[in-house]
Image (cartoon, rainbow, N blue to C red):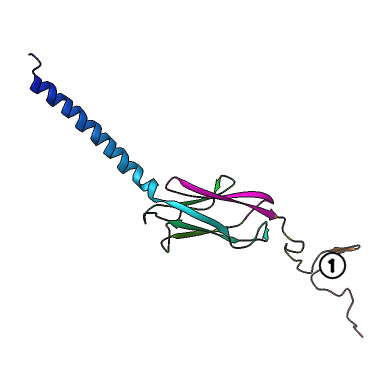
Amino acid sequence: MRNTPLRSSARRTGVGITGLAALGAAAVLAAPAALATVDSVSVSSNDLHVGKAYTVNASLSGAAAGLLVHFSDNGNEIGAPKVPWPPGSASISWTPDTSGQHIITVEQGGYTKSIVVQVADAPLGSGSSSTGSGFGPAGPLGSGSSGTTPNTN
C-alpha cells in the first residue's frame, strides 16, 4: 500500500486528536486539587499544655464538598481525615503529648498550610490526687483511720 495524501492527512489528524484528548484528561485530573485551598489554620488557645485537649480549626475555600481534610502534628496524623462541615471549615480535637515546638499542618487536595505553636509541660498539680491512704513510719496507715483505740471501759 502506498501512502496517499488522504491517509497521511488522516493519520496526522488522529495524532492531533489523541494529543488533545490527553491534555483534556490531564486537566480534568488536576482540577480537584486546583479547587481546594487551605486559607488559615488556628488552635483554640495560645496557652498550650501537654495533656490538655484543644481544637485545631481550618478555614477552606474553593474546595469540592467531597475532598477530605487531613490534620497532622509534626508529620503525625491527628485522627481520621475530616469532611469539611459546615462547608468551608473543618476542625479536629488535638491533645499534645510532648512539650516544645509543634508544626500543625492541614492538607486538602494537595494544598497545605502550617502553623508553629509552642506547647508547655503540664502545670504542677495537674496530676491525680491521693485517696487518703498510705504508709507511715510504723507501717500502713489505713484509709482515714485516726490511729486511736476506742475506750472500752
Q: Identify the residue shown where x is 20% and y is 27%.
A: 15
User: Which image quarter: residue 82?
Assistant: bottom left
In the rendered image, residue 5, in percent from the top left (x then y), is placed at: 9, 20
**149 to 7, vertically: above or below:** below
Q: Nearer the viewer, residue 16 or 115?
A: 16
Relative side of 135 to 122, left or right: right
Q: Identify the residue shown where x is 20% and y is 32%.
A: 17
User: Which image quarter: residue 148?
Assistant: bottom right
In the rendered image, residue 18, in percent from the top left (x then y), is placed at: 22, 31
Helix, strand or loop for the magenta stretch, by majority:
strand
Q: Identify the residue shown where x is 68% and y is 54%.
A: 119
Relative side of 134 to 74, left or right: right
Graded by Cα atoms within 10 Å as few (under 14), some (14 to 19) or many (20 or more), the crowding at tag 1 reads some
In the rendered image, residue 107, in percent from the top left (x then y), is placed at: 48, 49
Magenta part of the chain = 96-119
In the rendered image, residue 141, in percent from the top left (x then y), is placed at: 84, 67
User: Quadrant where the N terminus lies?
Assistant: top left
- Residue at which label 1 appears: 141
Q: Amino acid at mark 1?
A: Leu
Q: Secondary structure at mark 1?
A: loop
